[in-house]
Each structure stands twice: as structure tokens, then as C-alpha cells.
Amino acid sequence: MEVKSYEKGDLTEAERLYRRAIALAEELSDVVGMSIWMVNLAMLCEDQGRLNEALPLLKWAMEIFERAGSPHAETVRLFLRRVHLQMQPGCTGWAARSVVTIEHVLEWGWGKLAR
């Protein structure tokens, strides 16, 4: 549902559902599941230029993936790098996005995990 809302452009509903999924995963002690939804929410925040909100979500998710020994830690590290680049003075979103595109991430398998 969350991904469908995002794809349809209903970003408010997608954000509400992502936050709900994070809370439910936390209640169930599903830290890996929680980190997946955190990355999805971070992507939504990034798309809206809310980089200060995306950054801690990505840091936390990367930490969880690293502790779990997940290969997805590297993918999240790339997202984190992209957000950091976009936060640099004078950097346009396009310049940072050219470093790591969503197509790269999907090619590396994140899309299979997140859907």
C-alpha cells in the first residue's frame, strides 16, 4: 500500500503509511523490517527536499543493516552519500543524484527487498 501511494503521487498518504509501518515493525521487534520502511520514508523525504529528515533515517537504517550483516547496508550507504552531497553548499540535487541514481539502486536489488 505504501509503495502504491508513493507511485501514485499521494505523498502525504505514503508518508503516513511508512510511519505506521515503522511503528508496527518496532512493536514487533522487527528491526530489519523497520529499517526497510525507514529507507523508503527517507527516499520520500529526499524527493521532497527534506534532507534533514532523510539523513537520520538513513543513518539508523544503515546501522541496523550493518549489525544484521545485511548486504543492503552498502545500498543504504550510497543513499546516505547522495543525501550528504545534496546538503553541500552549492550542490544541486541533480549533481548528487547523478552519483547514485535510483536505477542503480534498483539494479543492485533494493527494489526487490522494498516491495
Image (cartoon, rainbow, N blue to C red):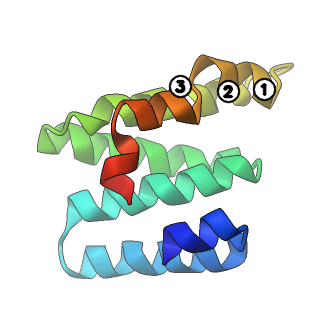
- Asked if 75 appears above or below 59 in the picture, the reply is above
Residue 97 is marked as 2
Q: CA distance from mark 2 to mark 3?
A: 10 Å
* 88 vs 22, nearest the viewer: 22
Which secondary structure lies at badge 2? helix
Residue 94 is marked as 1
Tell me where residue 70 appears, x and y as whole percent.
18, 39
Residue position marked by numbered label 3 in the rendering: 81
Mark 3 packing: few (<14 Cα in 10 Å), some, or many (20+)?
some
Residue at 32% across, 81% down = 24
Tell me where residue 101 appears, x and y as whole percent.
59, 28
Mark 2 packing: few (<14 Cα in 10 Å), some, or many (20+)?
some
Q: CA distance from mark 3 to mark 1?
A: 14 Å
Going by the numbered disc 1, the residue's amino acid type is Trp
Q: Quadrant of the C terminus?
A: bottom left
Q: Is residue 54 left or right of residue 105?
A: right
Going by the numbered disc 2, the residue's amino acid type is Arg
Which secondary structure lies at badge 1? helix
Residue at 29% across, 41% down = 63
Q: Is residue 5 left or right of residue 68?
A: right
Task: Name the image quarter holding residue 77.
Answer: top left
Tell me where residue 9 appears, x and y as whole percent.
73, 67
Q: Report if residue 50 is visible in the image.
A: no
- Asked if 95 appears above or below 114 in the picture, the reply is above
Q: Is residue 37 left or right of residue 46?
A: left
- Of labels 3 and 1, earlier in sequence is 3
- Of labels 2 and 3, earlier in sequence is 3
Q: CA distance from mark 2 to mark 1?
A: 5 Å
Residue at 71% across, 49% down = 47
Q: Do residues under tags 2 and 1 come within 8 Å of each other at their CB atoms?
A: yes
